[in-house]
Image (tube, helix red, strand yellow):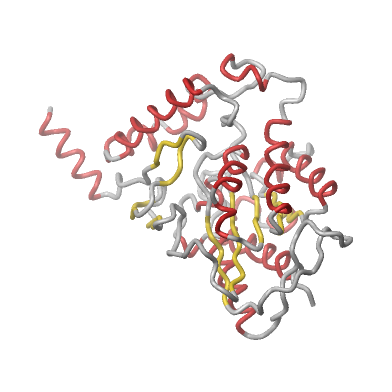
Amino acid sequence: MLVFLLLFEIVLRFCGYGNLEIYQPDAKLYWKLKPNQDCFTKVDHKPVHVNSLGTRGPEFVAAKPAGTLRILSLGDSRTFGWGLTDEETYSRKLEKSLGDYFKNGSAGSPLPAAGGSGEDGTHGVTRPTIQRVEVINAGVNAWSFAQMDVFFRDAAREWQPDIVILAEANLWTQFSEKNSPEFVEKFMSRVRLKNLLRRSAIYHFLIEVKLAAFYARHRTKFIPVDPKQDALFKEQQQSDPDAVFRDAIAGVCRTAQSNHIRPVLMFLPMLDDLQSTNQSRVLRAKQTIAAESKVPLCDVTRDVAPGAKALYLDADPVHFNAQGNEIIAQRLFETVTNLVVR
């Protein structure tokens, strides 16, 4: 049996299974990408590089260089690039488009800062002419809006981004700063165990691929999901369960504006959203916050609706493929360039 398992592991590794991304347990974030790793996406076996600062993509220095337009891209697996190479993600495509735009002299004007007294919430603070563009892909698989709020507030804002783009999150992960230290430690132990298992190609093949549909159907038995039913989250048992993620989205905007960073909210529809007559809860929340905080909202629903299923990964109604990411990047490009003072 041991020989069989060893051979099975070798064959699966030869077929591209194993070597998935590894996460660090964190007392505030629960999990974050372990820095300095080269691995592959769970589906389609696309290469992933995590830099020394724990984000997907090339290295960058924490202190923003002069003349740099720096954009922080926050989100879950849709931002990280589920089943995509780094170059196929909308963050990298946006960086390339903006880099070409400013390099060609289409706009060398300074970017306004957020949180001022102007009609759009800016006060037109002069910044150096843009010489290069960096888009930091800070997407992490399965992160909630609350985790992104903490990450931005406690870590990423120190990178001095000019703009922060907030995309989508997993709504079934309700983890926040309000949870007890006992629960946090218990969950971090689960992260350590899963990291150990994810080093095995057999685990990748059997559990995360073949049993993925089973897990998706029954994950509520393993992960706290519903604030109304989950005893671990009494502080979140309220008449307005959407407030859990709505407050976190607003928190990202407040942190950005108080630090003279321009927030941009983005809505990435799932395939079901394109076919539904009911508006998404997240889109409603982002529309409300965008109006109240005078923040741009980039809703790509109309852009992707004509392509529909052809713009998502095969048998995946959540994650966009490379073509879908190209469309998303183009809409973001229009939104970002509209923020430049002419």
User: Seen in the image, is 20 located left or right of residue 270?
Assistant: left
Q: Nearer the viewer, residue 155 or 183?
A: 155
Please provide percent x and percent y for residue 122: 81, 62
- On screen, 29 above or below 122? above
Which residue is painted at 59% across and 17% down in the image?
Answer: 230
- On screen, 60 above or below 41? below
Please provide percent x and percent y for residue 335: 73, 64
- On screen, 226 above or below 255? above
Which residue is painted at 40% across and 41% down in the image?
Answer: 23
Which residue is painted at 63% across and 63% down in the image?
Answer: 329
Please provide percent x and percent y for residue 223: 51, 24
Please provide percent x and percent y for residue 330: 66, 66
User: Seen in the image, is 274 located left or right of residue 139?
Assistant: right
Q: In which quarter of the view is residue 275 placed? A: top right
Q: Residue furthest right?
A: 119
Q: Nearer the viewer, residue 170 or 24?
A: 24
Image quadrant in which the C terminus is located: bottom right
- On screen, 129 above or below 286? below
Total label count?
0
Q: Residue furthest bottom?
A: 105
User: Seen in the image, is 272 located left or right of residue 52?
Assistant: right
Image quadrant in which the N terminus is located: top left
Q: Residue furthest left?
A: 3
Q: In which quarter of the view is residue 189 placed? A: top left
Which residue is painted at 72% across and 36% down in the image?
Answer: 247
